[in-house]
Amino acid sequence: MSMPTPPSTPLDRARAKAYRRLLPLLFFSYLIAYVDRTNVSIAALTMTKDLAGFTNAVFGFGSGIFFFGYFLLEIPGTLLVERWSARKWISRIMVSWGIMAALTALVKTPIHFYVIRFLLGLAEAGFFPGVIVYLSHWFPSRDRARALAYFFVAAPIAQIVSPKLSNILLKIGLDGAPLVLGLKGWQWVYIAWGIPAVILGVMVLFLLTDRPGHARWLEPEEREALEEELKREKAAQHAGKHMGVLEALRHPKVLLLAAAYFFIVTGNYGIEFFLPKILERWYSLKLDALTWLVILPPMGSLAGQLFVGWSSDRTRERRFHASMPIYLGAVFLALTPWSQGHLWLTIALFIGAITGLKAYLPAFWSLPGLFLSEAAAAGSIGLINSVGNLGGFLGPYVIGKVETVTGSFQGGIYFLSVSMAISATIIILLGLGHRTDKPAFAVDPLDEALVEPV
């Protein structure tokens, strides 16, 4: 079989090099960020037993308060990526969040837990939307959903990798096992995952490149071709009325995208933070079995994100690629309470639910760039993400509070399912992201270029 030929044009060579040079580092950075944000769900399996007063309501509130800190600095952080330096800002974020994540090991009371989770949110604010804006500096619109998909899949891979590694750490000091440096397993979960964030933050400072014009790893003609392509797209967007940052933040479609993201994030983090506890409650599972089972649903979301990113770019259709996975996930989630007593049916339904909760992402985050550019897009992406992520407080809080009051997760699960359906409906009604006239399966030289080193 003949080997793929390298792309023939400077633009295609630049596109291929950008994929290989930038996305691996961003992928690993987001992987660690996601673990540091959500490893509380695994640590809580023993943490809440060791610390007095840590009910599910306390755990849900503390898990969610992260997103209030996140909210406060999200828009300023995203604008700094657009107007200053993505490399420096993302490096600062990662070093500070790594330190805050590790300090979670020192909490003793619910108040300590609330404060450190709030500070962790402040530290991480701007990373996720900042990377989305950063990728728009490098990838033309035809590549953007696929580039986003390669970045977003770090989240489900984090959910696949981290539970078993955290499970090993959780056994420190458990059931008579010796402590390490006087610390228990749940404390080491926070420390062990905080250190890589600091290391990666330093690497980002030296290895990330802010814009194509600064990239010494591109040939001069490649830099010029990529910059010209990006300028051409911006000029086409500016052909109509130019929109400033404040105007963009008030734009009805921006506000509706923020609302849609709020409702889907409500469902996402409600399930992510409580899935281990739900399975533990319904099936009285031991720690080893539980940490094997919780890695299965993210495998579905990994496949779903890659497919949606690929299919959405090929068809140039965003609206149904964003909304349909969410609708399907809402149906699967609503059915999970009826599956109690049948473990593998429960797992299958959670796989479907969590696939829907993640697969929509590449298509969804391609929507703002369809009607905004530059600082307006950066500010709007920050607004959508910051407002939307307040759902990361609501979801865990509601499911934890409902369980504490009623003794059951059922009502909270139904609430999350309805929230997801509202999100998908908003996306459908927005009218953005219709399929373009480009043939769905036009050959792209980049598809072959990514197979072979440049």
Image (spheres, grey):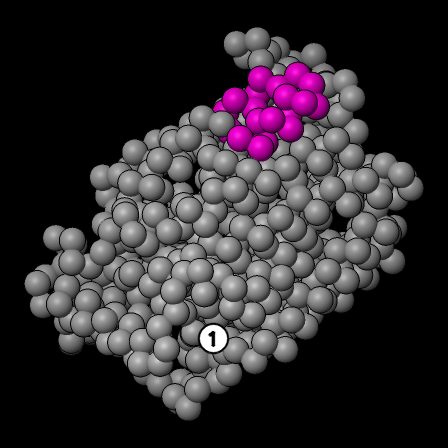
Side (left or right) of 447 relative to 64: left
Q: Secondary structure of the magenta portion, mostly? A: helix
Hey, what amino acid is under mark 1?
Ser
* Along the line of sight, the residue nearer the viewer: 375 or 192: 375
Q: Quadrant of residue 282?
A: top right
Q: Residue at x 65, y 40 (%)?
A: 64
Side (left or right) of 321 relative to 375: right
Q: Within 10 angstroms of label 1, few (less than 14), some, or many (20 or more) residues?
A: many
Q: Residue at x 63, y 21 (%)?
A: 112
Residue 330 visible:
yes
Q: Position of residue 211 (x, y in %)?
A: 22, 56
Residue 196 visible:
no
| Residue pointed to by mark 1 | 312
Quick one: SS at disc 1? helix
The N terminus appears in which quarter of the rendering?
bottom left
Q: Was residue 180 drawn as part of the magenta stretch in this picture?
A: no
Is 344 situated above or below 447? above
Side (left or right) of 104 relative to 148: right
Q: Which residues are magenta?
A: 101-119
Q: Position of residue 322 (x, y in %)?
A: 57, 70
* Along the line of sight, the residue nearer the viewer: 446 or 386: 386
